[in-house]
Every structure is written in C-alpha cells, then in structure tokens.
Amino acid sequence: MEFIEILRRRPKGFENRPLKTPKLEANQLDSGTRVKVFARHLWAATGFAARGVFCFNCDTYETDKGETSMKFRALVLLAMLAMTFACAGPQTPQGSASQNGSNTSDPNRKLKIGFAMATVREERWQRDRVAFEAHCKELNVECVITVADNNSSRQANDVDNLLTQKVDVLVIAPQEATEAAAMVEKAKAQGVPVISYDRLINSEKIDLYISHQVPVIGRKIAEYALQKVPKGNYVMVYGSSTDNNAHIMKKEQLAVLQPAIDRGDIKIVADQMIPDWKNDLALNFAENSLTKEGDNIQAFVVSNDGMAGGVISALAKKGLAGKVLVTGQDAGVEALQNIAEGKQSMTVYKPIIPLANQAVEAAIKLAKKEPLSTTPFANDRIGGKEIPAILLEVTVVDKDNLMQTVIKDGYTTFEKVYQNVPEADRPKQQ
C-alpha cells in the first residue's frame, strides 16, 4: 500500500487535476485480479508514475504532453514487477479449500459429512438416519443425508451431488455392493475418505467398514433355528443378492446347518434371495413354498424382520402363524410385537445408536487424518482382500428376554411391545 500511495501523490502543478478514486483497495483484490490489473496497466502506469497518477481500476488520466525519463520508467517498472509478483504468489485465501473442499487445519471450520443412504423404508433405517443426524448435531458437524429409495442409479447421482458439495467424508450405505465401488473410486479420486456403513461395499479402497457382526448374525440365526427345530423341513429366505451382507449371512447360516443336513436331520426344501429384502416378495415366496410342500414346513430361516413379517402373513393365511419357527434380524417394533404374541420366534438386536455414533466419530477422525482402531475383515466378494473394520456386538432376542434387552435398554417401551397381548398374559414390569 505504501508504494501505491507514493504513486498516487501528485506533484506541484497537478494538485487540482481530477483523480478518480480507485474502486477497490489493493488489499481487497485476490492474486488473479492483481495480475490482470498489472498486465493491463503496467506500461501506462510507468508512463504516468512520474506525474503522480496511478491507474488502478481501468480509468486513464491524460497528463501534459512530454517525455518521461526512460531511466525513471525502468525503475518504476522493476519496482512494480517486484510488488506484483510478490502479491500474486501462491496464496490460500481465508476459507479456501483443498482439492475436495476441506480445510481441516482450520479449527473454526465446520466439517461436512455426506451420508448416501439406500433406503429409509424400514423402521430400522429410519432409526439410523435419526441417530446419525443427532450425533452430528451434538458434535457440531454439518450433515448432508440423501436417500436413494432402493435405486442404485439414484444413489450414484446422490454421491456425485455430495462430492460437488465438497463433503470432507463420504458415508455410503450401499444399495448395490458392486456398483457402489465406482462411487468409492470417484470419492477417492478427489481425496475424500469413504466409510461403508452397515452394508459392505465391494471395494478394497474404502477407508472403513462399520457394521454389526454380520457373520455372527448369520450364525446366531441358524443356531437358534437348529436348537429349536433340530429336525424337519427348512425354507431359507435370504436378503437381496446385491447386498454383501445377505451373502455373508447365507454363507454362515449354511455352515451351521450343513452338519444337520449331512445327517439327514433337516432338509432345505426351498431357498431364495429376495430383491431389496422386500416384505411382499417374501410373502409370495413363502406362500409358494407352503403350497409346494403341502404346508409341511417346520422352519422359515429368514434373514431380517421385514421379510419375516411377509412370511408370518403367509402362515397366518394357512392358520400356521405361531406354529412354525420364523427367525429375523433388526429388532423392529413390529417384529418385537410378533415375538411377544408368539408369531415370530426370534430376532437379532443390533443397537443402532452406537453404530451411528461410532460412524460419525470415525468420519471426523478420517477428516482430520487421525488414526482409527480397527480390525481386518476379509471380503470374499473381492478375493478375500482385507479391509479395516469396526464390528459391533449383537444379541439374540426372543420371548424369554424381551424385558432384559430391548425394553431394559430403552430401545422401545413395554407398552409398544405388548400392546397386542392381553394384560393377563403380559409379564410383570420390572
């Protein structure tokens, strides 16, 4: 600024000449603008400098005719060159971003987490969304959540939009495990860390897979069925073929049941992977299986509560609800009510708040480039390659421990669980 002020001083004889006030002060211009101003006015400025006129915003000023000393012009030119390139050097203006828009070195900047969800149709996923948003708010983190409504193409667009919004971390609950790998590639190309939430993405480039103990869930479902129905005809109702978790559970369930199959104690008379884990498709499959087997089915090994509800509807039409074992997963309120009524045999309780909370906390650490405490998890769908994982514990819930688990934890209430059970048949509240 001192140099500019010197140039703006008008020597004797020019005090009354009009001099337009610059529209912008020098310190209000960014480096790009300064270079443009310099290129446009350098020669003019050196010509007018001796007369005390500095054109800073494209307004020229006519002076008396005469020659300016070449020596003086050269000195002014050199001085301006030094000043201009010093100003136009590498700078990071306040609030500017790195390649992915983040600037985590600024302690006052609010981190932004993008969460691309596949669905919130089921109660379980509604809980995830609420818990995730709540913990972001508690930790003063901006949260942008999108929902693809079970459409992988829409989820890909959602991810593109989140990256355009310069999120610091991308969390994906994938609709389609393999297609989501391309979303991971895009994020990583922009330097954005990626967390695979609950459902495993088929990519070795994800920074974290956070979920419940999916293999354990599969084993616990099959172990419960085998314990309660050690002999008979089984129907296997798996999740979506596009969901890695469905394949993991299928593998674990069959591993548990295989010895009993080999002995001839149980027979799998029907099995199917249900697209998008849809309740109505599970109902149709259960109806067809019952018809095919003449209702001679002792156990439906179902991989989640939504599909279990469809199976129960099919059984109810035959007067078999409560007489055939039905498993599940997620501990949805409707499933807990079915368990209380004796229509569903069990579910797997996966506390959602700890999962969402740890996902948010891990995202913040990744954004700040802080280390995570993880364990390796081998993804068989990509050749057994190991990825860092955080896997939370799960609990089997049936009619015998409803009070000691989901109700005691405050996950739901006694009144909701037993609302369809006559008061005389309800357990005493503890």
Image (cartoon, rainbow, N blue to C red):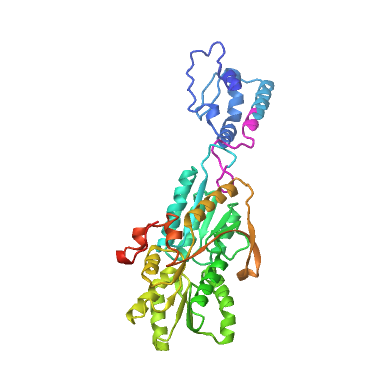
Decide if residue 321 is on the left or right side of residue 249: left
- Observer able to see residue 349: yes
Quadrant (top left/top right/bottom left/bottom right) for the C terminus = bottom left
Q: Residue at x 59, y 18 (%)?
A: 6
Decide if residue 188 is on the left or right side of residue 230: right
Quadrant (top left/top right/bottom left/bottom right) for the N terminus = top right
Up the image or down, 402 lies above or below 250; here it is: above
The segment highlighted magenta reads 83-103
Does the magenta-highlighted stretch encompass residue 101? yes
Decide if residue 417 is on the left or right side of residue 377: left
Front residue of 52/425: it is 425
Is most of the magenta stretch helix, strand or loop?
A: loop
Name which quarter of the figure residue 42 lies in. top right
- Observer able to see residue 420: no
Counting from the top left corner in percent of width and height, residue 65 is at 56, 20
Name which quarter of the figure residue 54 lies in. top right
Counting from the top left corner in percent of width and height, residue 421 is at 32, 66
